[in-house]
Amino acid sequence: MGASVSGGGRGSRGGGRRRNRRGGLNADINVTPLVDVMLVLLIVFMVAAPLLSVGVPLELPKTDAKSLPSDNESITISVDKEGGVFIQDTEVTLEELAPRLSAIAANGYEERIYLRADENSDYGAVMKVMARVNASGFSNIGLVTDPVSQ
């Protein structure tokens, strides 16, 4: 039996290019690096997503209450332990709260408002915020807590 090895003769072309059966260049895309990059991005976003929640640092009270279904477009109002009021991440005064929420309601927002209050915040301050939210036309208010660790 004999074997033929092409040794760079007249018909061979160098360069190490792959060729398909018809003799043309292989134009397939190698997706392995793309998959590697996508997996790294997936891991980065999985780690970073919980850190991107509402940015006001609060020590929420811990309860055994069941969680409410949440949507991505919800409005969150936060009350910190000093009594500061925040809509999402923007600090507002108690007097500015009702006009801003009324402006949001004028745009057709009828969803639940989530109220986050620090565990050490004044009960009266939280009730004043709830009254202002209710006076703005929002009656569906959800109180946010942390689950009890077992």
Image: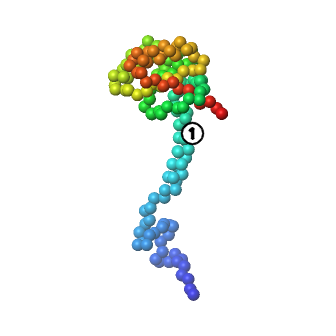
Which residue is at a point 51% across and 48% down the rendered structure image? Answer: 38
Q: Quadrant of residue 134?
A: top left
Which residue is at a point 52% across and 75% down the rendered structure image? Answer: 8
Depth order, front residue of 100/121: 121
Depth order, front residue of 145/81: 145
Instruction: Indicate left or right for 13 with 118 as reference.
Output: left
- Percent coordinates x, y for residue 77 in the rendering: 48, 22
Q: How is the image coloured?
A: rainbow
Residue 125 higher or lower than 140, as above or below: above
Q: Secondary structure at mark 1?
A: helix
Which residue is at a point 47% across and 71% down the rendered structure image? Answer: 13
- Percent coordinates x, y for residue 96 in the rendering: 43, 14
The residue furthest right is 150
The residue furthest bottom is 1
Q: Quadrant of the N terminus?
A: bottom right
Q: Type of residue at label 1?
A: Val
Local packing at callout 1 (Cα closer than 10 Å; few below 14, some 14-19, many 20+) is few
Report the number of numbered marks.
1
Q: Quadrant of the C terminus?
A: top right
Q: Is residue 35 visible?
A: yes
Q: Is residue 100 visible?
A: no
- Percent coordinates x, y for residue 109 in the rendering: 37, 26
Residue placed under numbered mark 1 in the picture: 47
- Percent coordinates x, y for residue 59 in the rendering: 60, 23
Residue 87 higher or lower than 25, as above or below: above
Q: Quadrant of residue 139?
A: top left
Depth order, front residue of 43/22: 43
Residue 26 higher or lower than 93, as above or below: below
Which residue is at a point 48% across and 66% down the rendered structure image? Answer: 17
Instruction: Indicate left or right for 107 with 91 as reference.
Output: left
